[in-house]
Image (cartoon, grey):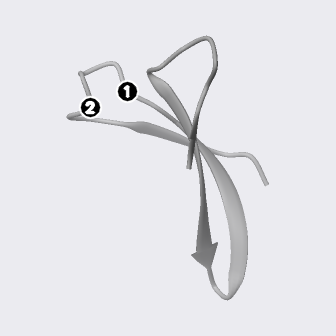
Amino acid sequence: MTVHPDNSKVIYVSRQINGIFEIERMETKGGGKTWETEAVT
């Protein structure tokens, strides 16, 4: 996991999906209570 250098509400995570590690961009607009997720790879 890494935090976006200019926006601390955005993080990038790598997680295993069906045996392959994928990267996702996650952004919170609710103070961390809710997250919007977008696949990067």
Question: In the displayed structure, would residue 17 be above or below residue 35?
Answer: below
Instruction: Label 2: state its secondary structure.
Output: loop
Residue at the (74%, 46%) spot, across then down: 40
Mark 2 neighbour density, 10 Å: few (under 14) some (14–19) many (20 or more): few
Instruction: Label 1: state its secondary structure.
Output: loop
Q: Residue furthest bottom?
A: 19
Q: Would residue 33 be found to the left or right of residue 11 on screen?
A: left
**CA separation in Å, label 1 and label 2:** 5 Å
Residue at the (64%, 19%) spot, across then down: 5
Residue 25 lies in what quarter of the image? top right
Question: In the displayed structure, would residue 8 be above or below residue 39?
Answer: above
Residue that carries the numbered disc 2 in the rendered image: 32
Q: Would residue 14 be found to the left or right of residue 33 on screen?
A: right
Residue 18 lies in what quarter of the image? bottom right
Q: Would residue 31 be found to the left or right of residue 6 on screen?
A: left
Question: In the displayed structure, would residue 29 be above or below residue 37?
Answer: above
Residue at the (68%, 88%) spot, across then down: 19
Question: In the displayed structure, would residue 38 be above or below residue 22?
Answer: above
**x then y, percent, for residue 8:** 47, 20
Q: Residue furthest right?
A: 41
Residue that carries the numbered disc 1 in the rendered image: 28
> Where the C terminus falls, by quadrant?
bottom right
Query: What label does residue 36 carry, if any?
Result: none
Give the residue type that dot 2 points to. Answer: Gly
**x then y, percent, for residue 26:** 51, 38
**x then y, percent, for residue 15:** 58, 67
Mark 1 neighbour density, 10 Å: few (under 14) some (14–19) many (20 or more): some
Front residue of 18/11: it is: 11
Residue at the (62%, 11%) spot, across then down: 6
Callout 1–callout 2 Cβ contact below 8 Å: yes
Give the residue type that dot 1 points to. Answer: Thr
